[in-house]
Image (cartoon, rainbow, N blue to C red):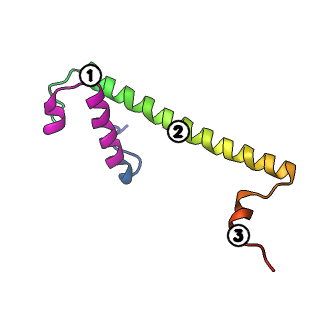
Amino acid sequence: MPARKKRPAKAKAKRPLDSLKYEVARELNLPKEVFEKGDWGNLSSRECGAVGGQMVKKMIEAARKTLAAEVAAQALEGFRQGLGLPLDDDLKTPPES
Protein backbone atom coordinates (compact mmCIF):
# COMPACT_ATOMS: atom_id res chain seq x y z
CA MET A 1 0.00 0.00 0.00
CA PRO A 2 1.46 3.40 -0.95
CA ALA A 3 2.26 5.94 1.73
CA ARG A 4 -0.49 8.42 2.49
CA LYS A 5 0.14 11.88 1.14
CA LYS A 6 -0.52 14.66 3.61
CA ARG A 7 -2.24 17.30 1.55
CA PRO A 8 -5.58 19.05 1.67
CA ALA A 9 -8.40 17.39 -0.24
CA LYS A 10 -8.63 20.48 -2.42
CA ALA A 11 -5.79 22.75 -3.46
CA LYS A 12 -7.83 25.85 -2.55
CA ALA A 13 -8.06 24.60 1.06
CA LYS A 14 -4.31 24.93 1.65
CA ARG A 15 -4.13 28.70 2.15
CA PRO A 16 -6.98 28.93 4.72
CA LEU A 17 -5.59 25.92 6.59
CA ASP A 18 -2.15 27.52 6.74
CA SER A 19 -3.56 30.77 8.08
CA LEU A 20 -5.57 28.81 10.68
CA LYS A 21 -2.42 26.91 11.64
CA TYR A 22 -0.46 30.10 12.30
CA GLU A 23 -3.41 31.67 14.13
CA VAL A 24 -3.57 28.68 16.48
CA ALA A 25 0.22 28.69 16.89
CA ARG A 26 0.05 32.33 18.03
CA GLU A 27 -2.72 31.49 20.50
CA LEU A 28 -0.53 28.73 21.94
CA ASN A 29 2.41 31.18 22.30
CA LEU A 30 4.84 29.14 20.22
CA PRO A 31 8.33 30.57 19.49
CA LYS A 32 8.78 33.45 17.01
CA GLU A 33 10.74 31.25 14.58
CA VAL A 34 7.50 29.50 13.69
CA PHE A 35 5.91 32.73 12.44
CA GLU A 36 8.93 34.50 11.03
CA LYS A 37 10.62 31.63 9.20
CA GLY A 38 7.99 28.89 9.20
CA ASP A 39 10.48 26.77 11.17
CA TRP A 40 8.50 24.03 12.89
CA GLY A 41 11.58 21.78 13.32
CA ASN A 42 12.45 22.92 16.84
CA LEU A 43 9.00 22.15 18.25
CA SER A 44 8.17 18.97 20.07
CA SER A 45 5.65 16.50 18.72
CA ARG A 46 3.39 17.49 21.57
CA GLU A 47 3.43 21.18 20.55
CA CYS A 48 2.78 20.37 16.88
CA GLY A 49 0.01 17.98 17.88
CA ALA A 50 -1.56 20.66 20.04
CA VAL A 51 -1.69 22.97 17.02
CA GLY A 52 -3.40 20.29 14.94
CA GLY A 53 -5.84 19.46 17.72
CA GLN A 54 -6.83 23.10 18.20
CA MET A 55 -7.27 23.47 14.42
CA VAL A 56 -9.68 20.53 14.38
CA LYS A 57 -11.61 21.98 17.35
CA LYS A 58 -12.00 25.31 15.56
CA MET A 59 -13.10 23.66 12.30
CA ILE A 60 -15.68 21.53 14.12
CA GLU A 61 -17.03 24.59 15.94
CA ALA A 62 -17.30 26.53 12.67
CA ALA A 63 -19.15 23.61 11.06
CA ARG A 64 -21.54 23.41 14.02
CA LYS A 65 -22.31 27.13 13.80
CA THR A 66 -22.93 26.88 10.05
CA LEU A 67 -25.17 23.87 10.50
CA ALA A 68 -27.09 25.56 13.32
CA ALA A 69 -27.67 28.64 11.16
CA GLU A 70 -28.94 26.49 8.28
CA VAL A 71 -31.30 24.54 10.55
CA ALA A 72 -32.61 27.76 12.10
CA ALA A 73 -33.28 29.20 8.64
CA GLN A 74 -35.14 26.05 7.60
CA ALA A 75 -37.19 26.08 10.80
CA LEU A 76 -38.12 29.73 10.27
CA GLU A 77 -39.17 28.96 6.71
CA GLY A 78 -41.29 26.05 7.98
CA PHE A 79 -43.01 28.27 10.55
CA ARG A 80 -43.71 30.91 7.92
CA GLN A 81 -45.22 28.30 5.61
CA GLY A 82 -47.26 26.83 8.44
CA LEU A 83 -48.66 30.22 9.37
CA GLY A 84 -49.25 31.22 5.75
CA LEU A 85 -46.80 34.11 5.95
CA PRO A 86 -44.73 35.15 2.92
CA LEU A 87 -41.33 33.52 2.65
CA ASP A 88 -38.15 35.62 2.56
CA ASP A 89 -37.83 34.92 -1.18
CA ASP A 90 -41.35 36.27 -1.71
CA LEU A 91 -40.39 39.53 0.00
CA LYS A 92 -37.43 40.08 -2.33
CA THR A 93 -39.34 39.78 -5.60
CA PRO A 94 -41.93 42.42 -6.48
CA PRO A 95 -45.49 41.15 -6.93
CA GLU A 96 -46.59 40.45 -10.49
CA SER A 97 -49.33 42.60 -12.01
- Which mark is first along the chain, 1 or 2? 1
Asked which quadrant contains residue 64, the reply is top right
User: Which residue is at a point 43% across and 32% down the rendered structure image?
Assistant: 58
Q: Main secondary structure of the magenta part?
A: helix
The residue that disc 2 covers is 63
User: Which residue is at a point 79% across and 77% down the rendered structure image?
Assistant: 96
Vertical relation: 92 (above or below) 9: below
Q: In the rendered image, is residue 2 in sight?
A: yes
Classed neighbour count for the residue bearing mark 1: other residues with Cα under 10 Å, few (<14), some (14–19), many (≥20): some
Classed neighbour count for the residue bearing mark 2: other residues with Cα under 10 Å, few (<14), some (14–19), many (≥20): few
Span of residues in magenta: 14-36
Q: Position of residue 2 (x, y in %)?
A: 34, 39
- Which mark is first along the chain, 3 or 2? 2
User: Which residue is at a point 19% across and 24% down the rendered structure image?
Assistant: 43
Task: Tell me if label 2 and label 1 are in contact, CB under 8 Å.
Answer: no
Which mark lies nearer to you, 2 or 1? 2
Which mark lies nearer to you, 2 or 3? 3
Q: Nearer the viewer, residue 89 or 22?
A: 89
Q: Nearer the viewer, residue 29 or 47?
A: 29
Which label sits on residue 93?
3
Q: Nearer the viewer, residue 95 or 25?
A: 95
The residue that disc 1 covers is 47
